[in-house]
Image: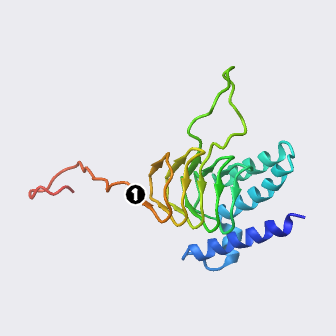
Amino acid sequence: ARVPEVRARLSADVQAAFDGDPAAGNTDETIFSYPGLLSLTVQRLAHEFYNLQVPLLPRIMTEWAHGLTGIDIHPGAQLGKGLMIDHGTGVVIGETTVIGNNVKIYQGVTLGALSFQRDDDGQIVRGNKRHPTLHDHVVVYANATILGGETVIGHHAVIGSNVWLTHSVEPHTVVLLEKPQHRLKGPKTESGAII
């Protein structure tokens, strides 16, 4: 009964991959060669089994895709329509992550947990919201890390490369690191320029 909805979500993912990548020649190319779409296809199917509380199989499915693509999406993550995972290697999306519609994520992004709550016996408490929420039209650039179950990224926000976030961000906010300074070492010419 859920297959038509899963198919609709995957169609939106295919279109997002094509629309978001000027190197894509057509949607067939994105379907058959983009690791992000393979991971999303497997995760969306595994998510349905996860919701039905089918044991073990959902995790086996997503770990199989992880092994092929380097993209680790837990079957419990809630993914909106039109998600694009560009390049994808090193992406980690945790179990309680919620992602809205038309979100774009680049390689190396982690949507993870800050820390794990423990009970009086020192055992990890399960079932809590540990991973962030990204609202619609968010873009997260390469190697950004967003942590924590109370961390909410507002719609149309842009999170720059290498940013480390453990707090919420308002809609339409751009979060960037200050421009890094390069330090070059090497032989110098007579004018003092480094070669």
Q: Residue furthest bottom?
A: 26
Nearest the eye: 110 or 21: 110
Nearest the eye: 76 or 64: 76
Left or right: 31, with 19 as reference point: right
Residue at 82% in and 51% down: 51
Residue 115, percent across and down?
58, 35
Q: Quadrant of residue 120?
A: top right
Q: Is residue 129 above or below residue 19?
A: above
Residue at 68% in and 77% down: 27
Name the residue type under label 1.
Answer: Leu
Residue 91, percent across and down?
59, 52
Say few, some or many: other residues with alpha carbon within 10 Å of mark 1 (under 14 / 14 to 19 / 20 or more): some
Left or right: 27, with 178 as reference point: right
Q: Residue furthest top?
A: 121
Residue at 70% in and 52% down: 77
* Quadrant into which the N terminus falls: bottom right
Residue 103, percent across and down?
59, 65
The local secondary structure at tag 1 comes to loop
Q: Quadrant of residue 160?
A: bottom left
Left or right: 7, with 99 as reference point: right
* Quadrant into which the C terminus falls: bottom left
Left or right: 190, with 19 as reference point: left
Q: What is the image's colouring?
A: rainbow
Q: Is residue 155 above or below residue 71?
A: below
Q: Residue furthest left?
A: 190
Q: Which residue is mark 1?
A: 176
Q: Is residue 137 above or below residue 90?
A: below
Residue 164, percent across and down?
46, 48
